[in-house]
Amino acid sequence: MRSVYTVRQVNAYIKNMFTQDFMLNRIYVRGEVSNCKYHTSGHIYFSLKDESGTIACVMFAGSRSGLSFRMQSGQTVIVLGSVSVYERDGKYQLYAKEILLDGAGLLYERFEALKRELEEMGMFAPEYKRPIPAYVRRVGIVTAPTGAAVRDIMNIAGRRNPYVQLILYPALVQGEGAAASIVRGIRMLEEQQVDVIIAGRGGGSMEDLWAFNEEAVARAIFECRVPVISAVGHETDTLISDFVADLRAPTPSAAAELAVYEYAAFETRQKEYELRLKRQLLQKVREKRYSLERLAMRLKAAHPRQKLNDRRQYAADLETRLRGQMERRLDKSRHKLAIYIEKMNGLSPLKKLNQGYAYVEDQAGRTFRSVSQAQTGDRLRIYVSDGTVEARVEAAKAREDLSGSAEI
């Protein structure tokens, strides 16, 4: 008997076939919206139709964040999604991930293709991004000369720093020839050696902004030696110029704030730096002066004159000490001498003479001590307290005969 399958098995098999088909997993489908219903769960159910047929579609609530408009029947849209089978009903349908109004869809496809190509070439790599100078003097502007963007940039730049020079290249930013005009503006301002370039415009539809998605503009920004700020006035999407530029600003006004430093804040910082520098300089001067004074004191102490003065003072101290010692020695010697004098005075013949004694010498100057030294006729010299007496020995008698007398 031949194999028999259930409805569920058949539907599952067909769904598996859809799943394995690469093209059906990511497909763009254009058609007119019909039977559009917003469910309370947040899902959107609708159909796409053209002159030959209809396909059921659903966008789940989780995918609605990318939907920028409210869908209505009769609109022509391009749906990006995958085709699969809903097993319960056995019907295939398109599961929408993104929905674009027709016209923007083709542009979006071109945008994604160019984005992938340039990204693979490394033009979005962060290592190629140049920093915006902190203190610019000349700012180049590539935008329409009559649009709100240039007025916003001028107002913001003038308020932040009136001394910054703005150079405008009046470019076409929309329509035929806009990309080529933007490229010429970037290259001309690069030759003018400005410090930074702002390329942008105000907001608009994707078609209006498309010039900033052109490959020529992307290459001009990437090859420019001057830092470029992309400043297209849109918030929801990012353009090719935003990816390639060194810095992306959400609006031209924001670009002016990013490019032009605030002069008042700069002056305030300069004054703070000046005060800080003065404080540090004074502190350094005080430290060096103190160090110099210490070195001067050390040099003065090591000067030969100082050493000579020290030696002189030392010599003077030694002299004083020597004089003191000599005085003490003299005093001591004087004291001893006085004692000796007193002793000598006690032994001095003169003292004895003053007391009534006399001193006798013979002719040879020898002390006459005994009668045995005398011979009759010897001449003697007698010392008394007030002079001398010359005498001649007439006779000499020993102590026993003291009663005798001598003739003089």
Image (cartoon, rainbow, N blue to C red):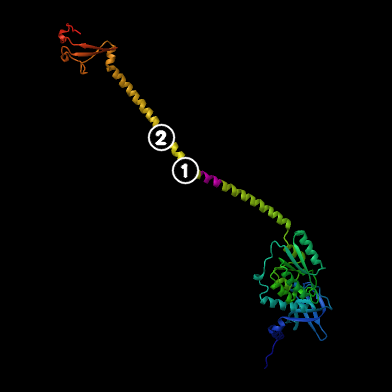
Residue 129 figure quarter:
bottom right
Assign the N terminus to one quadrant of the image: bottom right
Q: Is residue 294 magenta?
A: yes
Relative to 388, 234 lies left or right: right
Q: Which residue is drawn at 62% across and 50% down?
A: 281
Give the SS element for disc 2: helix
| Between discs 2 and 1, the one toward the N terminus | 1
Residue annotated with mark 2: 318
Magenta stretch holds residue 187: no
Please identify the dominant SS of the magenta region: helix
Q: What's under tag 2, amino acid-wise?
A: Leu
The vertical placement of 291 against 143, above or below, is above
Q: Position of residue 258 (x, y in %)?
A: 72, 63
- Residue 304's mark? 1
Location of residue 269 by image quarter = bottom right
For the point 73% across and 64% down, the residue is: 138
Which amino acid does the dot numbered 1 rest on?
A: Pro
Q: Is residue 407 above or below residue 65?
A: above
Q: Tell me residue 395's x, y (percent).
A: 16, 9
Please indicate, yes or no, whether residue 181 appears anywhere in the rendered image. yes
Q: Residues within 10 Å of mark 1 (few under 14, many from 20)?
A: few
Q: Position of residue 284 (x, y in %)?
A: 59, 49
Q: Residue 346, percent across and down?
A: 28, 17
User: Is residue 194 or residue 256 the one in the foreground?
Assistant: 194
Task: Look at the image and tell me whether residue 233 can be seen.
Answer: no
The residue nearer to you, when weighing 187 against 48, is 187
How crowded pointer 2 is (Cα within 10 Å; few <14, some 14-19, many 20+) is rated as few
Q: How far apart are marks 2 and 1 (CA)?
A: 20 Å
Q: What stretch is highlighted in magenta?
A: 290-298
For the residue pair 263 and 296, the one nearer the viewer reads as 296
